[in-house]
């Protein structure tokens, strides 16, 4: 690490005075607005974690809280997503799951011992005592992290909060922000709109977009707050519980969303739900596709747009959509020599290098192979719809290429469940501005319908 | 690093592992998940599920008769059951849910 030939560069980083965080006993510079992950990447840390079984070196891939390759021990807590923790002066962090260190991990011998893969069905051995010893060893080597330093009970009891609102919007990306804003505007203060964001910062794919970035995310958040939208940041909806209800909910209603922040458990319900959960960045299948230096397009875009971090001098961008094009243009503007392949006519076969990418092998549609030299591989393909919560509540999905398991909905975003709506990437609208437009349309439509339904109810003669 | 094509980075499941499962006759994403352990790590399948479903779709399209020999399997590609929690939640926070506010 910190090698002179490190392809990580932060030459263009500017902003307020840097401060320091502690990384495995050493001081590392960080800047206001950094996450732990972005600060370490800017400081030249190449290996951020070691994989579970083979102890292969890893670094960030998605940078948006969905993958599991940036887990660090932060302030005594194991397995914390370093891309979602704000860097603060004096914060302590360390890599885990490696011996003697993550840079030179002897346990990575497992990678050579199992050259094809690890079929755990054949890991049992005989005689019995040897098997017992081996199982013990496997348990020692495997697993993620060690228990927390202190008993978390010392930090005070967590609290539970129940909320019933008129419209609950899940996901504060372009679609969710626009939907919440439009819905609150239509309700004109006569109803509560709650917007949930799982990440530590609102904006979703705005934050990864080189032309929009934090400025657009903040402007969209301001518009939402001006309309009276309540926003909960760093609060992730983790499940739909169809049989349960909470004390604030109307007595005839069943089903709630469980959500959690660091200290608070939320039980949430609403008259209408709008899911704008976005998508998870995807990787392609090629040899050594997990080598550090293979990053999602969103991660690279976010480092550039939000943190002013440029990685490498010669990136190879794989992708052919609007986002891949705008990212390529932005990387070129930042002074990098960018190569591009579309991922279809020409596809990646292999990532070359050591603990960081040094080149790539590419194969074209005629089967011709060539090797290029690069110091970053950017996988800028569309994300896969984050439809897990919707599948839990029974929405129907279809597998699309690209797009993953996209939720089926009508032109107003309504799913088969009458009170559940979708917009943005989770419903297959991939482009950032199109997702925002779809969100505004769906949000307005949901609010208008809710107002009309209430008016109709009020004009009906009271029963009895 | 020995050469590997990783399908599931959280659990280190390789393409060879998935192909072995397919070779043994597992054509459903839930079966492949149970056999290889993919999708059971910190990200709960956000990186590996779609790409595996697309592989399975290709295998089935190449040999439709394989599916007919397994009439109990689902016909359409489907995600594996996404049980809560879909994102990691600390037990410390979940513990706040017991007690007073629980109503049925």
Image: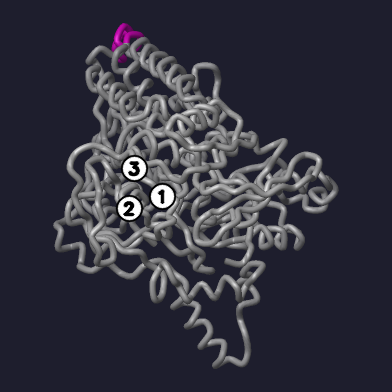
- Place of residue A350 in the rendered image (x, y in percent of width and height, measured from the top left): 65, 53
Q: Nearer the viewer, mark 2 or mark 3?
A: 3
Question: Is A460 part of what is drawn in magenta?
Answer: yes
Magenta range: A455-464
What is the crowding at mark 3: few (fewer than 14 residues within 10 Å), some, or many (at least 20)? few
What is the crowding at mark 1: few (fewer than 14 residues within 10 Å), some, or many (at least 20)? many
* A432 left or right of A178 in image: right
- Place of residue B74 in the rendered image (x, y in percent of width and height, measured from the top left): 69, 45
CA–CA distance in space, label 1 to label 3: 9 Å
Above or below, A127 relative to A400: below
Question: Is A195 part of what is drawn in magenta?
Answer: no
CA–CA distance in space, label 2 to label 1: 8 Å
Point out the tag, 2 or 1, that comes first from the N-terminus.
1
Q: Write down the quadrant of residue A405 in the picture.
A: top right
Mark 1 touches mark 3? (CB < 8 Å): no
Point out the tag, 2 or 3, that comes first from the N-terminus.
3
Q: Is residue A181 visible?
A: yes
Q: Which residue is mark 1?
A: A8
* A24 left or right of A288 in image: left
The disc placed on residue A11 is: 3
Q: Which residue is mark 2?
A: A43
């Amino acid at each position: 690490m910190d090698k002179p030939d490190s392809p990580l560069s932060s030459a263009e980083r500017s902003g307020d005075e840097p401060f320091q965080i502690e990384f495995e006993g050493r001081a590392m510079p960080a800047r206001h607005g950094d996450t732990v992950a972005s600060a370490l990447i800017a400081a030249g840390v190449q290996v951020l974690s070691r994989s579970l079984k083979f102890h292969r070196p890893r670094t960030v891939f998605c940078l948006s809280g969905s993958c599991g390759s940036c887990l660090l021990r932060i302030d005594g807590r194991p397995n914390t997503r370093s891309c979602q923790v704000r860097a603060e002066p004096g914060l302590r962090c360390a890599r885990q799951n490696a011996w003697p260190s993550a840079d030179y991990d002897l346990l990575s011998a497992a990678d050579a011992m199992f050259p094809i893969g690890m079929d755990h069905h054949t890991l049992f051995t005989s005689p019995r005592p040897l098997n017992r010893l081996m199982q013990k060893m496997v348990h020692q080597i495997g697993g993620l992290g060690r228990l927390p330093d202190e008993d978390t009970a010392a930090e005070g009891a967590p609290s539970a909060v129940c909320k019933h609102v008129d419209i609950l919007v899940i996901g504060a990306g372009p679609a969710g922000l626009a939907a919440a804003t439009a819905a609150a505007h239509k309700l004109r203060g006569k109803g509560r709109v709650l917007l949930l964001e799982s990440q530590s910062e609102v904006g979703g794919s705005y934050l990864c977009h080189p032309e929009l970035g934090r400025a657009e995310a903040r402007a969209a958040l301001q518009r939402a707050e001006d309309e009276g939208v309540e926003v909960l940041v760093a609060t992730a909806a983790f499940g739909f519980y169809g049989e349960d209800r909470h004390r604030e909910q109307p007595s005839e209603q069943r089903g709630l969303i469980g959500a959690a922040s660091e200290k608070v458990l939320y039980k949430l319900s609403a008259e209408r739900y709008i899911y704008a959960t976005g998508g998870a960045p995807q990787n392609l299948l090629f040899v050594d596709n997990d080598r550090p230096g293979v990053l999602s397009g969103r991660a690279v875009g976010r480092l550039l747009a939000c943190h002013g971090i440029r990685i490498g001098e010669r990136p190879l961008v794989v992708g052919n959509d609007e986002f891949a094009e705008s990212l390529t243009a932005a990387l070129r503007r930042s002074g990098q020599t960018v190569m591009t392949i579309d991922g279809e006519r020409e596809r990646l076969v292999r990532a070359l290098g050591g603990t960081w990418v040094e080149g790539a092998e590419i194969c074209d549609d005629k089967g011709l192979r060539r090797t290029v030299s690069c110091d970053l591989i950017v996988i800028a393909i569309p994300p896969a719809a984050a439809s897990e919560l919707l599948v839990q509540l029974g929405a129907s999905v279809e597998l699309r290429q690209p797009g993953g398991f996209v939720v089926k909905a009508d032109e107003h975003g309504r799913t088969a469940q009458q009170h559940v709506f979708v917009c943005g990437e989770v419903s297959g609208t991939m482009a950032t501005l199109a997702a925002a437009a779809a969100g505004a349309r769906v949000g307005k439509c949901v609010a208008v319908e809710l107002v009309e339904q209430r008016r109709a109810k009020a004009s009906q003669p009271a029963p009895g | 690093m020995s050469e590997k094509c990783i399908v599931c980075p959280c659990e280190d499941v390789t393409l060879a592992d998935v192909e072995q499962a397919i070779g043994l006759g597992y054509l459903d994403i839930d079966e492949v998940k149970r056999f290889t352990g993919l999708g059971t790590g910190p990200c709960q399948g956000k990186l590996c599920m779609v790409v595996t479903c697309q592989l399975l779709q290709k295998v089935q399209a190449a040999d439709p008769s394989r599916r007919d020999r397994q009439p109990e399997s689902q016909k359409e590609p489907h995600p594996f059951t996404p049980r809560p929690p879909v994102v990691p939640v600390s037990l410390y926070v979940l513990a706040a849910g017991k007690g007073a506010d629980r109503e049925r």
